[in-house]
Amino acid sequence: MANISNVAILGASGYTGAELVRLIATHPFMRITALTGERKAGMAMADVFPALRHLDLPVLTTIDDLNFSDIDLVFCALPHGLSQAIVKTLPKSVKVVDLGADFRLRDPKAYEKWYNRPHDAPELQPEAVYGLTEFYRDEIAKARLVAGTGCNAATVQFALRPLISAGVIDLDAIICDLKNGVSGAGRSLKENMLYAERSQDVMAYSYSGTHRHLGEFDQEFSLLAGRDVRIVFTPHLVPANRGILATCYLRGDADQVHAALVDAYKDEPFIVVLPNGKMPAMSDVQASNFCHIGVAGDRVSGRVVVVSTLDNLCKGSSGQAVQNANLMLGHPETTGLMLVPVFP
Amino acid sequence: MANISNVAILGASGYTGAELVRLIATHPFMRITALTGERKAGMAMADVFPALRHLDLPVLTTIDDLNFSDIDLVFCALPHGLSQAIVKTLPKSVKVVDLGADFRLRDPKAYEKWYNRPHDAPELQPEAVYGLTEFYRDEIAKARLVAGTGCNAATVQFALRPLISAGVIDLDAIICDLKNGVSGAGRSLKENMLYAERSQDVMAYSYSGTHRHLGEFDQEFSLLAGRDVRIVFTPHLVPANRGILATCYLRGDADQVHAALVDAYKDEPFIVVLPNGKMPAMSDVQASNFCHIGVAGDRVSGRVVVVSTLDNLCKGSSGQAVQNANLMLGHPETTGLMLVPVFP
Amino acid sequence: MANISNVAILGASGYTGAELVRLIATHPFMRITALTGERKAGMAMADVFPALRHLDLPVLTTIDDLNFSDIDLVFCALPHGLSQAIVKTLPKSVKVVDLGADFRLRDPKAYEKWYNRPHDAPELQPEAVYGLTEFYRDEIAKARLVAGTGCNAATVQFALRPLISAGVIDLDAIICDLKNGVSGAGRSLKENMLYAERSQDVMAYSYSGTHRHLGEFDQEFSLLAGRDVRIVFTPHLVPANRGILATCYLRGDADQVHAALVDAYKDEPFIVVLPNGKMPAMSDVQASNFCHIGVAGDRVSGRVVVVSTLDNLCKGSSGQAVQNANLMLGHPETTGLMLVPVFP
Amino acid sequence: MANISNVAILGASGYTGAELVRLIATHPFMRITALTGERKAGMAMADVFPALRHLDLPVLTTIDDLNFSDIDLVFCALPHGLSQAIVKTLPKSVKVVDLGADFRLRDPKAYEKWYNRPHDAPELQPEAVYGLTEFYRDEIAKARLVAGTGCNAATVQFALRPLISAGVIDLDAIICDLKNGVSGAGRSLKENMLYAERSQDVMAYSYSGTHRHLGEFDQEFSLLAGRDVRIVFTPHLVPANRGILATCYLRGDADQVHAALVDAYKDEPFIVVLPNGKMPAMSDVQASNFCHIGVAGDRVSGRVVVVSTLDNLCKGSSGQAVQNANLMLGHPETTGLMLVPVFP
């Protein structure tokens, strides 16, 4: 039997924090020993998230009040910009999975470009491993600091990385149209996130090539292709709590594209490639760590559409984080993550 | 003051039928003198649509029981295939606005290709005028038979026709990703239209270039361009009652594209082009006859995104039908249609 | 032809403000000459509510910048507490319809009890007429200041007032369970009004007899009954944008109850009593000024359930306000308000 | 380590069938060896429920094709009326958990009254144990045939049974107002279950004391009280996939009521009683086997409101079924059921 690992969650009062608690609560080899929430310090998690009321959880504290000496791994679910300041102060004995954006970009200039500020801990950037488990598994297992990917970035990369590697698509004609559930915006208060504004609505946001996850695409796809790759990417908010569905319009051959995906994921426990010609639906992966991918050709010759879908809070964020933590702590990678999607 | 026109609605028990009643009930120059619904004949509309309970409406009858002698215009909101059989039996004195697909394609071979059956009234096809009011206004005013456009077809054409006419986009690189409210599927019983299946879900449907509205795009865009045009088009169901939002990925210059749209629609009462760089939301046009269009360039040079949105039941179907009927009956085109969108 | 009345809307950047604009934009006898929004002063309404983009509306100003000399009537859609301070400074020539809570309670002590503060303009309280049009029609027509009712208060009063007047129910056994759409909470930023919190959820709020609309029930029902009446009342938030559905559990005879409602509303244009045994649905009145009421007996003898439903933003607030303004300005009461409910 | 039990699910193509698969797929001591679906026999579960695609499941068969010899326990998720015909043909060695209504009522006359047909297997009715685990635990552990409760019936009984037993409420003044997610209606095709009909709507159904779950209330509450008890009960459909929230209006003292609930459930793993004065929300228990209960007094003396909420597909049906199966098969009662609620 494995040892029990003690973990802390920094920023536990947001949605990804709650999702971490949900997953770890039934994880046989992890124990939550601390939870922080700056504005809600002193509160019981049952009062912040009544859905967690039956669990016996630590009271929320501030980060300053935390004792890191008996913590094996910290999940940072903090607002962008805060993680870098915190992580550099942590004892080197503590492993870190950061769910935010602070360590996703390896190049300080790229970070500054996309986040409009210099990085506070550039010395840590080279150490951080990009947390897309299926493609950085070995490095993650050895890492002290893992940078969770953007949820959009994960969805699109699952669709495209094997195609870029296999050389089966035109790198200059990649268009990704995303439909995003609302929880990706987090629990912060914005007028356009009110129920009455989002219900019955669809709208594009961060269009014109301004979305920060483009920094990850530029970095990862260019690295993979050995040349600059720039995709066109428009995310849209849809009235759903969880889920991202990415529709990728590509130039290539549907059979070759499908074969490349099947081959890449044939041994992956969480990535499901559908039969050629079938497309996944966003609700097929709800509240789970699975990603479903479908391929369909078009009547216009040489065109192919790949659709990829996952739960932004789980596989796109907290599930990915637990998957990475499993590797870092020496537990089997899928531990605690085989929960079946909830439907309907 | 205008004369009052007597109108009948065939197929009044579906959603487009109910929407016609909603619009005509407060129309100053139209009076509903007959409503048909084959399966619900004998029922009061208040029992089919309780939202219409306060109105004094005719009881539903069968089409066979209708007396066409005192009817000026008939709205056909019948299932595809049925209209052609009915319309050819109508007295020539009765004007017809067909909301279905039967007379949208002028070429009998194209009809047979997309609808998998020969046309029952090919002699009427040349007479039918394509009902996209803003582009066929003069012909519609003189027509006896007008073919309402597909709701997706309308949404995308509002975005693209001026761009094709102005020659400002690459005709071989048009990709349209649609997000469609559920009412477009009508009131017929299908498992995947149940609330529990559609809520919290997004999924592509009729992908791979199989959607029937492609027949309209092929016909209209090729005619406009003077050469064959084939677009890539993927519709998706989103959890909303009404609305279509089309995201069109194009090759062109954003300023030129925006200027072409502004120019084309500067005198149109229902088509609103947003300032360059702003994008519309689906809920901005809910329950109205307006179409909002936005343009945004991309960081990838030469790429531009146009988003177009309208209410599928209103501007995409029943509102368009009333707009066309106004022209055919000699009423001012906007009569009864200036209802402000409902938000939230 | 009637004269055109000039109206201003104070607090036009909230949902009831937008709804007023929606209704008045197609009103033949009212013209919007000023719109205020303290935090959004200087903005165009098209930027605050893109759904209103096609309208030619005044830019938002502050109240201080308003010139009241050419304004016939002011709609106050201001936060509770602010109206009383504003209204007492207005010229006496300006008529006022207040959509807030400031003038609903006639008794300063009752106001202080329910709103936890003394009234700022107690001298105006006796002048204010309670704005439940169907029951205060004559006073409203002569009033300078009309106090719009609470939206819950309107829904329940439409169900119960005729029953109390007719003496057909037990006054000591009235239980009202409400299901409320989310827009009733307004556009202010609260964590539990975020889409991800309200979607898929139902929860009771302001329970235990603490909801402020109870002040209105106490006042109105006691006045009507000639004795103290205290109802049990629990509102619940449901995932819908608009609408209130009140389920009232009563002791009485279903036939007598139904007859009393039919008799009370037989000449009312906006109140629809369904056939005995039929119940209305919330979506039957969406975006309209109608209220539907149903009655059903129970297998337990002497028990009867009355269900009443209306759109909180329209009949429950802005539609009621326009109805009252019509009376105050000498226009026909139903002008601009016969819009048919939107379904689906 | 426990033995592995082989289980079959009859009627696996409906929502409760899918929920059983979801729960059992991660259950350490149960193995699904057969799945039936009469209309979908021959199909893979991945095609009926794509959310289950990653699982290695048996293909759907007809019941006739089933070999019961190696099956320890059968879950019957069949339409009402069909279970009784099937169950009486099963070998006595097979344990049965019926999720339908066929064995809930012990009295053949009561069954005939509520279901409008004589029972096909009245000889089995005395043997069937009512499946409300927390109150029939010992009998269930020894039973061969357990009758799952109605989902509404479970929700209300969790709120009221301890209060009836403790004698702290007036038995002649019980009113229960329910808000029900849509999945309770199952996957069958009905016009009023379409997305466009249910979205944005709330409506009462099976009112007037006609809902079949009243048969269970009559049976259970009368047995408990030692006299006839008849409650008033109105269920409403709300736009949510899962969940029932019951608001119970009672005469009694809030402190006594709260104390009775706390006392009754202090050792129950799945029933959570909130602090006095706090109310649960429907989304607090989503996709879980938990039931949350809250109590609040009212300003009207002697009135108390109890709110109870659970997930109709899980604790209200399939979760309850697995809980009972655990007892019947000798596994720890909570095995496979400690999944944390999904929020948001």
Image: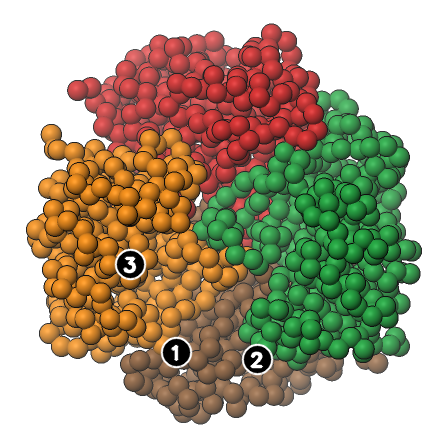
Chain colours: A orange, B brown, C green, D red
* 10 Å crowding of disc 2: few (<14), some (14-19), many (20+): many
Circle 2 chain? B
- Looking at the rendered image, the quarter that the C terminus of chain A falls into is top left
The answer to whether residue B158 is left or right of residue D343 is right
Circle 3 chain? A
Badge 1 or badge 2: first in the primary sequence: 2
Same-chain check, marks 3 and 2:
no
Name the kind of residue labelled 1 in the image: Val
Which mark is in front, 3 or 1?
A: 3
In the image, residue B81 above or below residue D193: below
Residue D161 visible in the snapshot: no
The answer to whether residue B37 is left or right of residue D130 is right
Name the kind of residue labelled 3 in the image: Leu
In the image, residue D241 above or below residue C17: above
In the image, residue D86 above or below residue C313: above
Quadrant of the rendered image containing residue A83 = bottom left
* 10 Å crowding of disc 3: few (<14), some (14-19), many (20+): some
Q: Position of residue A307 (x, y in %)?
A: 30, 61
* 10 Å crowding of disc 1: few (<14), some (14-19), many (20+): many
Numbered marks: total: 3
Identify the residue position indicated by label 1 in the image: B305
Give the Cα distance between marks 3 and 2: 45 Å
Name the kind of residue labelled 2 in the image: Ile
Give the Cα distance between marks 1 and 2: 18 Å
Identify the residue position indicated by label 3 in the image: A82
- Secondary structure beneath dot 3 equals helix
Identify the residue position indicated by label 2 in the image: B271
